[in-house]
Amino acid sequence: MIIVFGIAGFIFLGVKFTWAEEPTRVVFLTWKPNQPEVWDTVIQDFQQKHQDIRIKVQVGPHSSTEYHAIVAQRLKNKDASVDVFFMDVIWPPEFANAGWALNLTSRFPVQEQNKFLPGPITANTYHGKIYGVPCYLGAGLFYYRKDLLKKYHFKPPESWEEMLTQGQVIIQGEDNPGLYIYSAQFKQYEGLVCDMMEFIWSNGGAVVDHKTGKVILDEPAVVNALTFVRDRIIGKAAPRGAINYEEPESLDIFIQGKAVFHRNWPYAWAVANDPKKSKVASKIGVGALPAFSGHSSASTLGGWQFGINRYSRHPEEAWRFIQFMTSHETQKIFALKASLAPTRRSVYQDPEIQKKRAHLKAFLPAFEKARPRPLSPVYPMISQELQRFFSQAIVGRKSDLSEMATAASMKIEKLFKLGAMVQK
Amino acid sequence: MIHRGQNFYLTLLVPVILVLLFFIAGPIGHSFFLSFHRIIIGLPQLKTPFVGLENYQELLNDPVAWHSFWITVVFVGTTTFFELLIGILLALLIHHRFPGRGALRACVLIPWAIPTVVSAQMWRFLFNDAYGVVNYAVFGTEITNYIPWLALPSTALLSIIVADIWKTSSFAALLILAGLQVIPEELYQAARVDGAVAWQRFCHITWPLIRPALLVALLFRTIDAFRVFDLAFVMTQGGPADATNVLQLYGYKKMFVEGWMGYGSAISVCIFIIVLVLAITYVRMVGQRLLEARV
Amino acid sequence: MMKKLVKKLLFVAGILLAAGFSLTPFLWFVLSAFKNQAQITAIPPQWLSSFSMDSFYSAVARYGIIHYLLNSAIVAGSATMVTISLGTLAGYALARLPRQWGQIILMGILACAMFPQISIAGPIWRFLRFMGWLNTYQGLVLPYVALTLPLAVWILALFFREIPEELEASALVDGCTRLGSLMRVILPLSAPGLFTAAILTFIYAWNEFFLALLIMTDPARQTMPVGIALFQGEHTIPWGEIAAASFITTAPLILMVLLFQRRIVTGLSAGAIKG
């Protein structure tokens, strides 16, 4: 009798014990990371330190478009089954305006924000409130074959023209039939916007005039930059096939030793220096992208941020998770083991980082000056128009780009107005 | 037997009709419904007003949509023609009795058994302008002559067409083979006795008797070809300069990327109507005979 | 004599061409599974200079394709069983109903197969969420059943039509129930048709990507096509592992096709697409 009671008591207490201690389940919808082991370890670590929270990881594809579709599908249906998700640097305005991302201003005050690099923080801010915490960032960087430059006594080019001249000399000197001057991404996808904006900005152009707010794609600065790419880069400095290149293919060309100069995100540094994958390991340098004469270098801001679902039932736990994932320690681990560029200033000054990842210091100036693409809740629509316009411009056999530019400007102007209609 | 039987048979149909109703007919109806509204996912403040046929009017005036339509028509026309042609040739080949026939049949079925996403990645790999085997096969080691198949508007659509023909010819071959295997051997023997040559045998016996099979293959292929998506999505994302922006990919971009749910639904409805019209036309062409033989 | 030889040569050439056409692209791609990264993207393309199973190992250990395979097997297997069961009932009914009814219903079922899948995906997702079936096996199996039923019903109706009604009549006279006569008399006779529909359904469910991506975000439940799509990291395409995974995902299908290929072809042919 007593034994039965005892056991029953134990069981009852046991049940009560677990009930009281039942951990909160936080669902983290992410894409498949490049180094899943690193992420797994970090998340395990978090769960160790926070015994009352369990992280359930769900995985979507890395393609920005597809991941966006999957996240949006949940959020637009006010689905509470995801708590934490990622946002590409161009999404916060859309997510904020649609009421999908939770307003984090109370949890993430300005003093905290200032510990991060300014570019990503701006990208996460919409109408003065902040909706995301930057996880890691990217910016367009300029990679070059320092061995070839040294051989021909060149310093890294500061202007696009200079890059072409240097390239010509090198190609003639090297007598290598498959060698190209430049490799970058020109397929009709989001990456095209990133690359083309760098050409446009470095010629003093822009999509929108900051003072008047008008779309200025038909201005000479923009049209000339596009003409330059169409006439001097595609099929000449870069392989014609670059029109179908995303990051992997363009990087392949560089690491197979078939290009002297290359534009890519920070991740390319680790890949290009890996002797198992690259034929040019230890022969490369990196710096800021060239510009057109008389203008300064520009680089497109990239990277991913954490967001909380506005309809999440566990915002507090979700926030604690995000705080951990964006802490100095975690960002250091990501930088050391996963080659992800940190968004906290303090990490760049950390002595261990400076020793083992010295190149990050070289990236920092580009990171600080990286420019965001147009911030608007309808950016996806604007991006589609820009992609169409840029692709037609650089592929096209149409000689006059200004007509195309005016048409595109009008369409994008209308889209901006649409986005502005909901400004509160 | 008729009346009691009918109830029994109708009951058998109920589960299928229920499943189809919930999962297909319902969503189709919902899409129709959405296509009459103006919906922007990212701007919920604008609500979702009813706009009647406005989406369709806009669609008719949308140059990108028309461009997509023509590209899709070219795709459907070319792939269907070649797939049926190759299908006939393959079917004729497999129809003969020879050792290893089973193995060849299995070989021919392989392209169709591969997932489309794998197949698309594979062709992207093969058509690569720097290390793709297609270039190597055509130009050897003269790297400077390599064509960037997926980067030129003229060849990008061609590449997707080739990828589709490779994958789906075997499906057409199967259907046509079915038709071939029903033709009585006696007809051929009689023809041979009469002194008919192979070509004559084909024209007078084979061709007329496989016409129904051909038309069924045509029906299924056209329905699927008009809805092509995976190939364009994986290989070119619709580029370069919209050269491979097939209709369903355009619809996907409008709906899932830009958030125009109403407009995207209108595109889907249009695809559906086009396919429906084509299907009805095909069935009429064959006449009632085909459906009678089936039902 | 010469004519016969030429004919034979042409024939053999035809066979080689057919086999080459079907196999070569896939074989070349699968070869990448045995190369290392630098060799895969080598310019000009290299044959196998060194044999390495690294990609396979990596695909299994690091990317975990075995459990994707299991999920695919469960989903495709269940979908096939349900579709065949329901399809048999419906096909039988349509084969025996009076002509006009049958025609209308068949066309209606065909129309269900015509709508673009991207538009159907959203409402299906919402329905599944409402039922709490996201990230469950049934959440994927049921839509697959709906998507494969049209073709299955068409094929099965075709086959059942071929079987004369007298057979059932005599079974009924012998004391069978209607359903019993279906099971014992009709089904065995239409085994080829069943096989055809089953294989078509299985392959479709095995290879389906769009819905699987949307409905299954829990890695524990994801199927093979989604798994392969997820191999792609940010800015990296692990060709070796993708090729290895492609080989592993296609091998079961090819085996099935090899084992049943005679049945499939007889299946479709006995369907008698007569003039």
Image (tube, grey):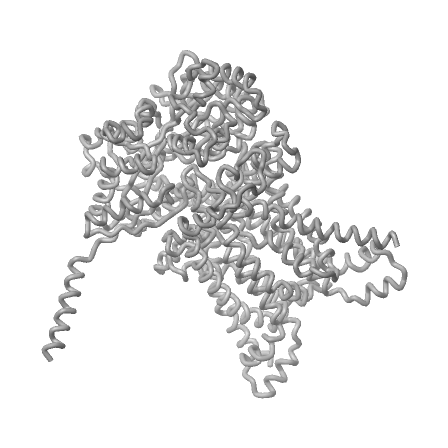
Which residue ends up furthest to the left in the rendered image? A2
Q: Please report the residue visible at 86 percent of the width from the left and 56 percent of the height from the top.
A: B197
Residue C153, located in which quarter of the rendered image?
A: bottom right
Give residue B118's position: percent from left, percent from top.
52, 48
Residue placed most toward the observer, A255 or A401: A255
Give residue B111's position: percent from left, percent from top.
60, 51
Which residue ends up furthest to the front in the rendered image? C50
Q: Is residue A35 above or below residue A251?
A: below
Q: Is residue A322 above or below residue C262?
A: above
Which residue ends up furthest to the bottom in the rendered image? C174
Give residue C231's position: percent from left, percent from top.
44, 45
Which residue ends up furthest to the top in the rendered image? A294
In the shown orientation, is residue A173 left or right of residue B182? Answer: left
Q: Please report the residue visible at 58 percent of the width from the left and 45 percent of the height from the top.
A: C28
In the shown orientation, is residue A147 left or right of residue A117? Answer: right
| Residue B30 appears in the figure | no
Q: Please report the residue visible at 19 percent of the width from the left and 57 percent of the height from the top.
A: A22
Q: Is residue C92 above or below residue B113?
A: below
Q: Is residue C82 above or below residue A175?
A: below
Where's the C terminus of chain C, which quadrant?
bottom right
| Residue A103 appears in the figure | yes
Where's the N terminus of chain C, which quadrant?
bottom right
Give residue A277's position: percent from left, percent from top.
45, 35
Q: How many marks?
A: 0
